[in-house]
Image (cartoon, rainbow, N blue to C red):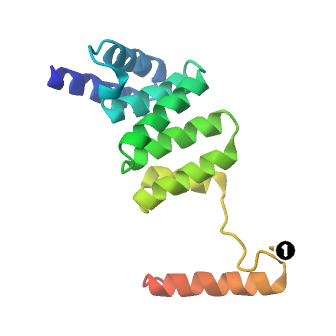
């Protein structure tokens, strides 16, 4: 039975990758809703993706966000859970919560490609070195360049 669930889950993931989210939602709905146990016994990854799809396909954002948060509460160490939740927040135009969620995910895995891609798409910039001055202030510009130079040198980049 577990391998059947795994096959269905993997099929849903492939459908998500190809943009067939409605079909993926139907598979995950069957997987989650047909389990004989309570929601607290369903695997966190099933909840995360089911929540994500519930939001973006069915536009039931409240339920989708609840499911994604439940998955993170159970297993906070999966960066893709944060990616799913952050994308839901973007879908409801809550950019602030999306950014916070993506950065929480980067605390779990600072090299996660999905999270970094979303952050780059949003064009998120680092805070000014001296937040009490405008970003365009000359001292902030110079300090920001120095910060970036030191960061790159510490990573062995040029």
Identify which residue, 113 or 131, lies in the foreground.
131
Instruction: Please indicate whether residue 91 sits to the left or right of residue 30 in the image.
Output: right
Q: Residues within 10 Å of mark 1 (few under 14, many from 20)?
A: few
Image check: 138 left or right of 33? right
On screen, residue 13 versus residue 83, left or right, reads left
* Vertical placement of residue 86 versus 43, above or below: below
Q: Position of residue 98 (x, y in %)?
A: 61, 46
Mark 1 falls on what kind of element? loop
User: Residue 84, how many percent across, how many down?
Assistant: 49, 39
Residue at x 51%, y 55% (from the top left corner):
104
Tell me the quarter of the picture where residue 93 sits. Answer: top right
Query: Residue at horizontal 37%, vertical 20%?
Result: 28
The residue sitting at 63% across, 39% down in the picture is 90
Can I make out residue 56 in this image? Answer: no
**Residue situated in front as seen by the camera: 16 or 40:** 40
User: Looking at the picture, how far across and down is residue 60, in whole percent?
Assistant: 59, 21
- Residue at image point 49% right, 52% down: 115
Q: Which residue is mark 1?
A: 134
């Amino acid at each position: 039975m577990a391998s059947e669930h795994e096959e269905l889950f993997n099929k849903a993931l492939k459908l998500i990758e190809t943009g067939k989210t409605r079909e993926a939602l139907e598979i995950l709905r069957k997987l989650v809703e047909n389990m004989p146990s309570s929601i607290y016994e369903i695997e966190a990854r099933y909840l995360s993706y089911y929540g994500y799809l519930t939001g973006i396909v069915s536009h039931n954002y409240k339920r989708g966000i609840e499911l994604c948060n439940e998955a993170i509460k159970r297993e906070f160490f999966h960066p893709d859970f944060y990616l799913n939740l952050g994308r839901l927040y973007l879908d409801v135009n809550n950019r602030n919560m999306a950014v916070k969620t993506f950065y929480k995910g980067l605390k779990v895995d600072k090299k996660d490609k999905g999270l970094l891609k979303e952050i780059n798409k949003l064009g998120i910039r680092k805070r000014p070195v001296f937040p009490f001055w405008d970003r365009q202030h000359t001292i902030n510009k110079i300090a920001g360049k120095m910060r970036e130079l030191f960061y790159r040198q510490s990573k062995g980049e040029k």
